[in-house]
Image: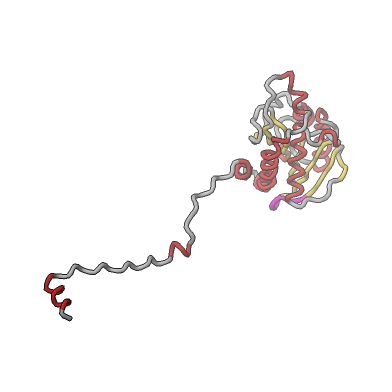
Amino acid sequence: MQLFVGLGNPGAKYAQNRHNIGFMAVDRIAEDHGFGPWRSKFQGQLSEGRLGSDRVLLLKPETFMNRSGQSVGEAMRFFKLEPGDVTVFHDELDLAPGKVRVKQGGGHAGHNGLRSIHGTIGPEYRRVRLGIGHPGHKDAVAGYVLRDFAKAEAGWLDDLLRGIGDGAPALADDDSAKFLNAIALRVNPPRSSPTKPDTADALAPEPEETPEEAPRSPLQRLVDKFR
């Protein structure tokens, strides 16, 4: 069994914030893979389903971002999970919008949700870092992450979430490369190949050319004159 955790803040006020991209990611997985209804449990919202042969729990902590670890720890204890069974989806300032990286263990880089999870279960869990870009100055970070995605960002955000849904079974199967490739195919689809001729046209026989008449000799022209 695995626990996929999406980080965010509860309530309609925050639903479209950049800080809530983790919630958006697990919502997309639940929708694309027919997970069960969300229900209140472990100080959050829980949905259960399968990704391939793996049973997966999706969790959206409702403790607000800086106490996310309380919800995650409660779920882990109930299901007797280890940190290695946990994957956390979260916003990442240090990645360009639409970029994604998968990381096992490491620091929290000042992210309040990760800091809380570190304090509860330690650092040895997997995280999916979802790039939202940086506002350019650290003093602008709080306002930036708590603002909604701009309308101009809707295209790449939708592609990213579709890619996460596509690649989720690979992530559950511990194939990070395949997961990231599924996202790349959505965010940066390959260019179409040059237009090929219609098969019927390509196989049609070329029209035969009428052979040119050979030049006639003076004797033949004289004979023709008296015919």
Q: Is residue 125 above or below residue 134?
A: below
User: For residue 220, what is the image quadrant?
Assistant: bottom left
Q: Is residue 56 above or below residue 115?
A: below
Instruction: Farthest residue to the bottom: give it.
Output: 227
Total residue callouts:
0
Instruction: Farthest residue to the front: give it.
Output: 226
Q: Is residue 167 above or below residue 203?
A: above
Left of 74 or right of it: where is 111? left
> Residue 100 at what x, y percent from top left?
64, 36
User: For residue 88, what is the image quadrant?
Assistant: top right
> Residue 151 at what x, y percent from top left?
73, 36
Residue placed at 39% from the left, 67% from the top?
205
Q: Residue 206 lies in magenta, yes or no?
A: no
Q: Foreground: 203 or 67?
A: 203
Quadrant in which the C terminus is drawn: bottom left
State which region is magenta: 49-53
Q: Foreground: 151 or 77?
A: 151
> Residue 49 at what x, y percent from top left?
77, 50
Q: Main secondary structure of the magenta part?
A: strand
Q: Foreground: 11 or 38?
A: 11
